[in-house]
Amino acid sequence: MGAMDGEKKAVFRVREFDMERDLAAAEELERRCQVGLCGDAADGSGEGKRKTKKRKKRGMSLSVEQVGDPLARVRHAPEHVMLVAEYGEEDEMVGIIKACVKTVTRGGAGKKLPSSSSSPEKQRQPPAYVKVACLLGLRVSPSHRRLGIATALVERAEEWCRSRGAAHATMATTTSNAASLALFTGRFGYAPFRRPEFLGRPVHAHRLDIPGGHRVLQLTPPLAAAAYARLLAPRDTEFLPADMPALLSHKLTLGTFVAIESDPDPSLPPSFAVLSVWDSTRSMRLRVRGAPAMLRASLAALRALDRGAPWMRVPSIPDIFRPFGAYLLYGLRMSGPAGPALLRSLCHHAHNVARKNPACAVVAADVAPDDPAAAAVPRWRRFSCDEDVWCIKNLNKNDDDSNAAAGADDDWAAPAPPGTVLFVDPREF
């Protein structure tokens, strides 16, 4: 295939990624695409660094870079692919994109689908589970943009997903990544969809206290799966994966924890909180960039003081100006009048677990801003971000029969009904 850019004719090919042949070139392309502080790569980069969280407060920003297995964010799905674009006679790798097709809950968004009967009573609900495509990690070499490479990669990825039964495609970017938003909402017809918030806090050198009246218990994966089946109903939850038991038993899920009151008030409804912890230290690295020298020196001094006088319990934090890892909290739910306090205790427990891993410097969660759990999650403003944007596209918009069969009506892009839970899969972070 080819594209025109002024007088320059571009010839490139799109094919599937080969780990043995392409790994080094893919890593080099990732490095070249890391432009700016937040990954806002130029036109044609699409997603840029999707998971680059940017907070430009006084010049500082928090960025996230993927490391290790290039397929880590899609490999969990039975159907996944990574496509590469090669340019010129030397077959230089100039673009990549990842995609997977997964089965998730749709939640209650969207209208009822018309049945063969015109009676409103005969209208049927969309299916609880649908096949959804997830497009990730679109990169185009800075020296090969505006040649149609991003378009070719996205269209090829969408076609690959559509052929495997995906009814919708999703992608994620940030509000500050104007090039990415313009590319997907303009050229590719995606619509802004959901706005999860990234809530992070650094791991302190000392344990965080958990109230004596709170008990923290760890659930086995089967018990955790049963608990979430009760707490996350398919009609009330968006993007809950059909393979939730596999996620809970994954080697990187360090545990599912529940907090209860030791001596609950019998006159009040019972309270509890639950969350799961995912170790992402082997798949991503965060870094704070653009910090003033004075702040760097102050935090270094606190670390030195804490090492010399640990009994003072100075709130020192790791060196966040070098790459560091994170633990991700997912499946955060709570109930009852003491629910928020119990959820905070669970976050403290996760922090204390993270202290045992020298590679972990941050504990974070991705939650919908209107989720009651969001208000209970401890966070530092500079380690948090509200710029994430999920976008969605109906892959079968020209096929009415397919839409009815797959539940792929356009109304899923509408606001979610009140009380809907947005599940963020940590495997795709």
Image (tube, rainbow, N blue to C red):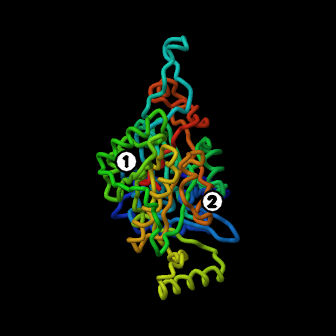
Q: What residue type is labelled 2?
A: Lys
Labels 1 and 2: the sequence-earlier one: 2
Q: How many labels, in total? A: 2
Image vertical order of residue 408 relative to residue 175, above or below: above
In this rendering, does residue 90 appear at all?
A: no
Q: What residue type is labelled 1?
A: Ala
Image x and y of residue 123, in percent = 51, 17
Q: Which of 7 and 60 is in front in this view?
A: 60
Q: State the residue position of label 1.
A: 77
Residue at point 41%, 74% (across, down): 358
- Which of discs 1 and 2 lies nearer the camera? The answer is 1
Residue at point 47%, 40% (across, down): 267
Q: Which of 158 and 126 is in front in this view?
A: 126
In this rendering, does residue 214 appear at all?
A: yes
Image vertical order of residue 128 relative to residue 252, above or below: above
Image x and y of residue 116, in percent = 49, 14
Q: Are there few (<14), some (14-19), or many (20+) residues within 10 Å of tag 2?
A: few
Image x and y of residue 425, in percent = 44, 50
Answer with the quarter of the image where residue 300 lies: bottom right
Rounded to the nearest angstrom, the CA distance separating label 1 from label 2 is: 39 Å
Q: Nearer the viewer, residue 205 or 134?
A: 205
Residue at point 56%, 47% (across, down): 368
Secondary element at image label 2: strand
Secondary element at image label 1: loop
Image x and y of residue 58, in percent = 70, 71
Q: State the residue position of label 2.
A: 8
Looking at the image, residue 386 sits to the left or right of residue 420; the answer is: right
Residue at point 56%, 51% (across, down): 374
